[in-house]
Amino acid sequence: MGKMLFNLRHVPADEADDVRAMLDAAEIGYYETRPSPFGISAGGIWLKNAEDHPRARQLLDEYQRQRRDRIRAEHAEARRQGNSETFLSLLYARPLFVVCMLLGIIAVASLVLLPYFLLTR
């Protein structure tokens, strides 16, 4: 029976490709389920044999540790060079988007706090 190794919800395509390549290189059998049309299921990468799970999990943990370190180093380098995205850089690049998001946040916060203010009168 198969065992889920990797949920594909919010996973970048390059990371999913790397995981598939890692499993292929280790000659671990897997199959993939696709996301549902309505977003109920995100899809995932499943191992064909549950006995392969400890080895696959170890490989995946090592890959994710390396990826995390690489991404953090890239982000730190971008911050040192001044290329990382900040609130002000996003505001200058996409002012309408930022204003709409801020108005949306205020609207949601108002709706959440409305019962409190109505009940404390």
Image (cartoon, rainbow, N blue to C red):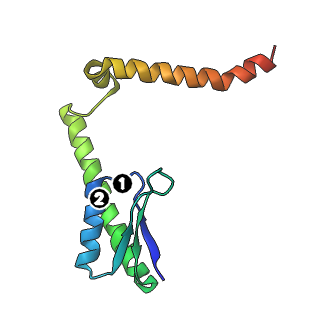
Q: Position of residue 91 (x, y in %)?
A: 32, 20
Q: How many marks?
A: 2
Label 1 sits on residue: 11
Q: Which residue is mark 2?
A: 15
The local secondary structure at tag 2 comes to: helix
Q: Amino acid at mark 1?
A: Val
Say few, some or many: other residues with alpha carbon within 10 Å of mark 2 (under 14 / 14 to 19 / 20 or more): some
Residue 25: horizontal and vertical position, in percent? 22, 77
Which of the pair 4/67 is nearer the observer? 4
Where's residue 118, x and y in %?
77, 17
- In the displayed structure, would residue 95 be above or below residue 78? above
The answer to whether 70 appears left or right of 105 in the picture is left
- Which amino acid lies under the numbered mark 2 shown in the image of this protein? Glu
Furthest toward the front, the residue is: 37
Q: Residue 76 placed where, x, y %?
A: 26, 42
Would you place residue 37 above or below residue 4 in this image?
A: above
User: Neighbour class for label 1 at 10 Å: few (<14), some, many (≥20)?
Assistant: few
Residue found at x 59% / y 24%: 109
Residue at 46% x, 71% y is: 4
- Circle 1 SS class: loop
In this picture, residue 75 sits left or right of residue 117: left
Residue 88 picture quarter: top left
* Mark 2 touches mark 1? (CB < 8 Å): yes
